[in-house]
Amino acid sequence: MKALRLHRAFEAIWGTPRGWRGTVCSVNHSTLGIRLMVTAFAFFLIGGVLAMLIRAQLATPHSAFVGPEAYAQLFTMHGSIMMFLFAIPMFEGFAIYMLPKMLGTRDFAFPRLTAYGWWCYLFGGSMLLVAMLAGLAPDAGWFMYTPLSSKPYSPGINSDFWLLGITFVEISAIVTAVDIVVTILKMRAPGMSLDKMPLFAWYMLVTTMMMLVGFPPLILGSILLELERAFGWPFFDVTRGGDSLLWQHLFWLFGHPEVYIIFLPAAGAVSTILPVMARTAILGYGWIVGAVIALGFLSFGLWVHHMFTVGIPHMALAFFSAASTLVAIPTGVQIFAWLGTLWAGRPQMKMPMLYLIGFFIVFVMGGLTGVMVAVVPFDWQAHDSAFVTAHLHYVLFGGFVFPMLAAAYYWLAHFTGRQYQYRLGVSAFWLILIGFNLTFLQMHIVGLLGQARRIETYPAEIGWTAYNLVSSIGGFILAFGIGLFLIDILLQFFHAPKSKRNPWSAGTLEWGMTMPPPSYNIASIPHVEGREPLHDRPDLALSLARGEGYLGEPRNGWRETLAVGTSSGKLDHIVVLPGNTTLPIWTAAVTGSFFLLMLLKLYWLTPLPLLALVAMAWRWAWLLGRKEDVGALPIGHAQSAPTHAEVQDPPGWWGSIFLLTADGTFFVSLLFGYAFLWTVAPAWPPPQLFDGGVLSLVTGVGATALAVIGARVASRRLQRGNGAGGGMVLIGLVLLIAALSMAILGAPSPTEHAYNAVVAVLLAYAVFHAAIALLMQVFVVLRARAGFLSARRSAELRIAQLWTDYAAGSAAIVLLAIYVPALTA
């Protein structure tokens, strides 16, 4: 009876309203995770239909099924949908749904940010679908190589749809990555140190850190290309000091880590499912974690792997070829750990295991061809051929889709509350496995025979017809298999019997709750002693349902959960999460209106959504906090803890750290582009460098120092109980913005030369961040006057100080990068 009483009480606090109101205001991680997965799978089906149209065109020579313009749109949208709208959102949705359950917590660190990311993804993906339905789909390839995607060769708005829509979607990916990293590091069950985390959490931690470092270069490249297309700033125009290879560097700085960003979450699912299917513990936990971390680091040293044919110096070719081969080692460590687990256990051939076997077969073949294209002479022959298309699909379909299909069956009871009943899945598996290999095995051969990718037709006498026909037949068999899988899953929702708790006898926490789980996940939070808590304590699930863990009684209508030390897992503080709100959807809609105005070339209206975003962000932050100190509160087991508002490093502080990590990567990528053009592009440096004078430089750098010192003075005043006086920091930031604005006004026209354009972007970046810091400092001053800050409640001031330090530091680097070359010339 106590469990039922707790369920009703917690559901009243954590539940989502029914009807349309719940649809637009829910911030529950389970609801949002399911939405992401369902939408991503819908995009997968759309991308699959586009693939079938491509195979229909290539089935016979001289096919008139579609013309070259339509074919260009088909393969561009197919690649873009699968990479940006299916793979990443699918694993993000799965992580959003599953991670809190695995970690023994009740929700994500930033529920409203989770919802904002979902709405940005939905709106951004819808932009691309509208473009396709209107016949204006991007047609310059999912890689958008310049100069093909530049204005002279793509004069319509097709490429703008890609640049703006994908950037919108990438905002969703970045904020979700921040949310996941902070949740993994801080929102675990007490006692769950890093070495006791589920392997899936390790995989997601490395993956999201890679996203924070890997996605900003693409966002930067998209912004620069849109600026060139919209305003004529010549970053990639070789006639005005630009270089088209800069786009390739920025794109592949994202693009090659992207392969591992897609693979690693699926590998995390393999490492979770495989030991349960083998009925034994995973072999080499530490080795797997080390391999995942090594893979994350090595993946960023491989981007030139995709540029072997563009004229790279031989020393660089040798380095990147060796690095591309080296990355096979951590992948091999994981594969042998999985094989060793199977050898040590007693595998059971359930549906998840079938798809894991398919994963081993397909992914290993893709890895072997990956080693082949890592060898420069072979890559010169196979580059841009159908061989590379086949390799890519063996790696991504084998390394992502097969594990995710295994995950669908393994965690099916979480979503349906029912046992797996029908056997259609076996037939679907064989259709998918056979159809996939029929489709893409032939592509290796026809690619070696010379068939280029992205070409809509070929002559009959060249000898490629049979291979292409078999590939097309295989593609349709694969499509039937996916359709059968979908039917099988839908049948489980309506006709299968109810599932018991923990049907696989697994040891991880996500199985210690009712199926499907309630909105709050668990009625009380456990103390974890090992990697498989349900095996360590068979009665744990029932104990938690009775409220015998931490936070086992609702309090004040708060959505409470616990935060722990990042590495030790020791209990740190209580986190009180915000409830349901419509702020995320409205903020995403305002963000989308900015991109829509850019797309429609209504540039003079774009300041309006930016101002609205400032107002909504202000409202977003103002709703948090309280005006009194509450001290340490009881949490159960004779322990107490403070709330997050009264600690030095709450989740918001950690979120700022990782958001600034992504921001810093964006800035470093911009400086890389500046240095690349300076050393490689023709007509660099230009005859006239920007020269604002020594006085202007000293004024700007002095203003940054004043802002940094002022932020620390304000923090000390607050700690002494004298209020958060921010006069010095405000003066410093105002002076900094004035100095940077004067530099922008005195800079040469950015349309004349790429140097001028890069200088303008660097100065705009510095002004933008100085303005953010100024707004945050004004916000903190007003919050202090309203009573929200005290010596104990000082986290908001520390967060503002982080952003002020970053703004000052980046502005100083910008000023030095711009002024010093002119002063030393």
Image (cartoon, grey):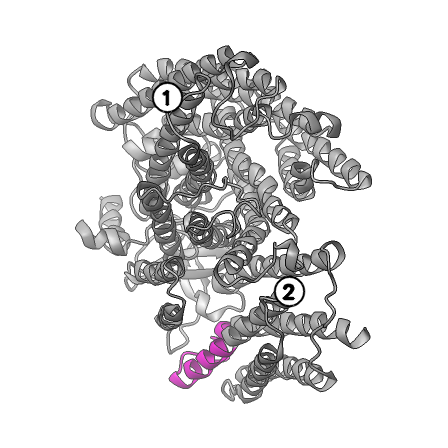
Q: Amino acid at mark 2?
A: His
Quarter occupied by residue 540: top left
Q: Name the one closer to the observer, 468 or 538.
A: 468
Question: Which quadrant, please, contains the C terminus?
Answer: bottom right
Q: Is residue 217 left or right of residue 612?
A: right
Q: In terms of sequence position, does the residue under pointer 2 or pointer 1 come before the other?
A: 1
Secondary-structure class at tag 1:
helix
Q: Residue at x 56, y 44 (%)?
A: 145
Principal SS element in the magenta part?
A: helix
Q: Amino acid at mark 1?
A: Ala
Range of the magenta residues?
774-797
Asked whether the viewer can see residue 93, the reply is: yes
Residue 135 locus on image (x, y percent): 34, 42
**Cα gap from disc 2 to disc 1, whole angstroms:** 50 Å
The residue that label 2 is drawn on is 753
Q: Confirm whether the magenta stretch covers residue 375.
A: no
Q: Residues within 10 Å of mark 1 (few under 14, many from 20)?
A: many
Q: Name the one closer to the observer, 144 or 362.
A: 144
Q: Name the one closer to the observer, 318 or 776.
A: 318
Secondary-structure class at tag 2:
loop
Q: Residue at x 51, y 49 (%)?
A: 184
Circle 2 or circle 1, nearest the eye:
2
The residue that label 1 is drawn on is 479
Q: Is residue 672 above or below residue 536?
A: below
Q: Residue at x 36, y 17 (%)?
A: 428
Residue 714 locus on image (x, y percent): 56, 83
Q: Confirm whether the magenta stretch covers residue 789.
A: yes
Q: Residues within 10 Å of mark 2 (few under 14, many from 20)?
A: many
Question: Which quadrant, please, contains the N terminus?
Answer: top left
